[in-house]
Amino acid sequence: MKVGIVGAGMVGSSAAFAIALMGHASSITLVDANEALAKAQAQDISHAVPFASSTRLASGSFDDLKDARIVILAAGASQRPGETRLELLSRNAGIIRSIVTEVLRVAPDAILIAASNPVDVVTQIAHRVSGLPANRVIGSGTILDSARFRSLLGQHLGVSPHSIHAYVLGEHGDSEVLAWSSARAGALPIAQVAAQVNVSLDEAVRAEIDSGVRNAAYTIINGKGSTYYGIGAGLARLVEVIGRSQNVVFSVSSVTEEIEGVRDVALSIPRVLGAGGVVTDLVPQLDETEHAALHRSATILKEQIESLSL
């Protein structure tokens, strides 16, 4: 399976590194406006491959993405001094439009995975520009937020995160919603697990975990400038699931026909991913507070996309 990655910065290169080491693709092609950067990343990663897999690495132009089954969109502009968020969004909309047009010119059957921030808005832009069905335009969404949620819950309960089933919904950003009411460890609700292992899960503990999930990116960015290893591994896992048609549930972003009364908005809910992209949506049971929070998150995202001229 051939995978293309547009954007050879930290996120794109981390995804390429993870995909290559895990052997999830037969070949990876990196494309970047900075051709020297793409070439250097491809060469560097290819030197690690002999220790783990047989994935072939290359750099090139959009033409070299021909026949790619999956293309990861990891390119975008950074915010300029004095530039508003809306101005940045508008500038990135133009960049995404150009990239998607070029990708589909040579790889019309590809599944697109958006990883650039703000990822939900980028996903919606890519969907509109491409004209592809929503199931083939996927944003990384809250996969990393959900992983952080499970990790912190697992640490608190003394249970492996692999046995925790918990999702973060809505925006990958400040309005995201931790779905506590549907969180499980094995087959039991989280509150029952906490009671059985004699661990408190009161409001103070929940608030601490919520803060840990919601503010993790800020902590990492303050320490080293940006986040990339976590999302790189997450993108590699999405590539594996699609490539191997595993039908696994992830909280990815995709344009959703209706959620909490808001129509046609890209945001994250649990979805089954398989060979063709999104197979089906699995909307979790929520309590009243979570319903309201998800409505607010969807509304914020809808307002952002409507503020752009696409």
Image (cartoon, rainbow, N blue to C red):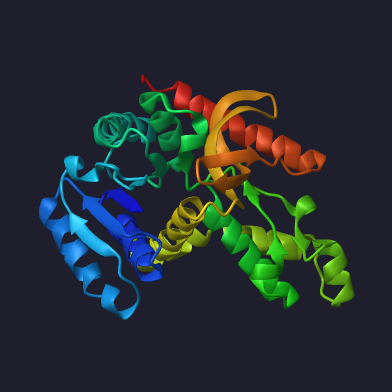
Position of residue 73 relative to residue 143, above or below, is above
Question: Whole-percent x and y of residue 309?
Answer: 36, 19
In this rendering, position of residue 118 left or right of residue 298: left
How many dots with numbers?
Answer: 0
Q: Residue furthest top?
A: 309
Looking at the image, residue 149 lies above or below residue 6? below
Relative depth, front residue between 191 and 264 = 264
Report if residue 16 is visible in the image.
yes
In terms of depth relative to the viewer, which is nearer, 235 or 276? 276
Q: Residue at x 50, y 31 (%)?
A: 134
- When the figure is inspected, residue 151 is found, relative to residue 100, above or below; the finding is below
> What residue is rendered at 57% in x and 54% in y?
246
The one nearer the camera, 82 or 270, is 270
Q: Quadrant of residue 195?
A: bottom right
> Where in the figure is residue 299, as x and y percent of width and height?
59, 29
Q: What residue do we see at 56% from left, 56% from top?
A: 145
Q: Position of residue 53 (x, y in %)?
A: 34, 72
